[in-house]
């Protein structure tokens, strides 16, 4: 009796299956690696210092029947407002020493077409000094004096369309830092209402810090960087898929030889009955016998050989083929 062992064949199949599973696993890792960015930029901000300028103000009137002196308004009636008194305050945090200069001024000008022609400027007050952390200045916008000054300019130049911009300009200098500049303007609208514009200003000095972090993927109980995974995982997938492809290619070559008879081949087990064996020299001879006896071809493995047998009574016509190392099961 010819004995047919399937143990090595099962081992080969299990090994091939293992390679395919690993190839699929590393393919999945590859997809994950390419879906995730290799790096993350972490940005943080730190405030170095803050500066603030603010002006509080109140009006004083020629007629107190509606507004009492010292009333703070967003808009002051120009015809009854004699002056607007204010206090300008500056502070820096954390406290630092520096110097300041401030001027209360009116710039007189006329407009020709779209061009503004400067006439002169007049200073109503100026301040300067040093400070540490903060300082304050008393400021007075004398509306009566401002109206008188504009009238003098118009009469003195003969330019009765002349106008004036009145403003408080504050500049703060701290060594090694940008100059803090704050302009508070006195404006008049078409209804004759007076108002102070831009009475508050804040400045914050912020530094931006960025750090590039390598993103990582969990792998084999540890982790690898995404950039490494993009190189490693596809390579491993290719390496693990090559053995199954090679095995299938070899089997395909073997099957190609038997392709004309493949549909007549059945897997079987050697018979225990005593039979006369007739060795066939080629696949072509096996095909000729098959055409003559018209019986199925039984395939089994005996040692290191594939056996293709056609049983006709007590005669077994056999074609023996040596198995290659990769085919041995």
Image (cartoon, helix red, strand yellow):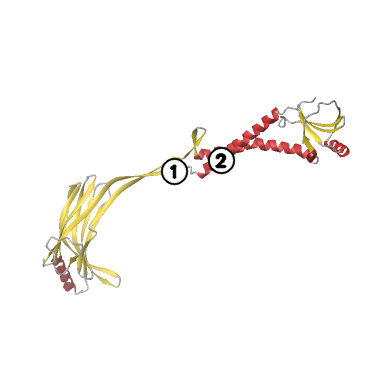
Q: Observer-nearest residue: 203 or 191?
A: 191
Res. 166 visible in picture = no
Residue 266, image quadrant: top right
- Looking at the rendered structure, the number of numbered marks drawn on it comes to 2
Q: Position of residue 142 (x, y in %)?
A: 14, 63
Q: Observer-nearest residue: 1 or 152?
A: 1
**Does the CB distance between marks 1 and 2 fall below 8 Å?**
no
Q: Position of residue 197 (x, y in %)?
A: 23, 61
Chain-order first, disc 1 or disc 2? 2
Secondary structure, mark 1, is strand
- The tag on residue 40 is 1
Residue 246, image quadrant: top right
Residue 21, image quadrant: top right
Q: Considering the image in quadrants, where does the C terminus appear? A: top right
Crowdedness near tag 2: few (<14), some (14–19) or many (≥20) residues, C-alpha within 10 Å: some
Outermost residue toward the right in this view: 292
| Residue topped by disc 2 | 28
Q: Position of residue 165 (x, y in %)?
A: 22, 65
Q: Observer-nearest residue: 116 or 11?
A: 11
Res. 311 visible in picture = yes
Say which residue appears at 57% left-offset and 38% top-offset. 26
Q: Is residue 145 above or below residue 261?
A: below
Q: Considering the image in quadrants, where does the N terminus appear? A: top right
């Amino acid at each position: 009796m010819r004995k047919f062992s399937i143990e090595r064949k099962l081992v080969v199949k299990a090994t091939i299956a293992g390679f395919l599973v690993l190839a699929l696993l590393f393919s999945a890792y590859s997809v994950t690696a390419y879906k995730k960015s290799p790096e993350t930029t972490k940005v943080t901000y730190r405030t170095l210092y803050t500066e603030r300028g603010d002006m509080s103000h109140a009006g004083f009137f020629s007629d107190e029947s509606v507004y009492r002196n010292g009333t703070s308004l967003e808009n002051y009636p120009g015809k009854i407002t004699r002056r607007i008194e204010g206090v300008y305050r500056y502070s820096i945090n954390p406290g630092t020493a520096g110097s300041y200069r401030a001027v209360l001024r009116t710039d007189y000008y006329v407009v020709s077409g779209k061009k503004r022609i400067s006439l002169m400027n007049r200073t109503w007050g100026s301040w300067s000094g040093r400070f540490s952390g903060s300082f304050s200045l008393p400021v007075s916008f004398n509306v009566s004096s401002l109206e008188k000054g504009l009238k003098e300019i118009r009469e003195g130049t003969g330019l009765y369309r002349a106008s004036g911009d009145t403003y408080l300009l504050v500049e703060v200098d701290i060594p090694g830092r940008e100059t803090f500049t704050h302009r508070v303007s006195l404006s008049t609208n078409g209804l004759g209402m007076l108002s102070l514009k831009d009475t508050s200003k804040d400045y914050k000095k912020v530094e931006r810090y960025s750090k590039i972090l390598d993103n990582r993927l969990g792998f084999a109980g540890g982790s690898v960087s995404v950039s490494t995974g993009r190189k490693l995982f596809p390579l491993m997938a290719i390496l693990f898929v090559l053995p199954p492809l090679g095995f299938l290619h070899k089997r395909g070559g073997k099957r190609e030889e038997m392709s004309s008879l493949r549909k007549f081949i059945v897997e079987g087990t050697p018979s225990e009955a005593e039979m006369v064996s007739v060795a066939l020299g080629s696949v072509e001879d096996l095909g000729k016998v098959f055409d003559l006896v018209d019986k199925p071809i039984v395939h089994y493995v005996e040692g290191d050989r594939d056996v293709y047998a056609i049983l006709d009574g007590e005669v077994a016509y056999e074609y023996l083929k040596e198995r290659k190392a990769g085919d041995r099961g």
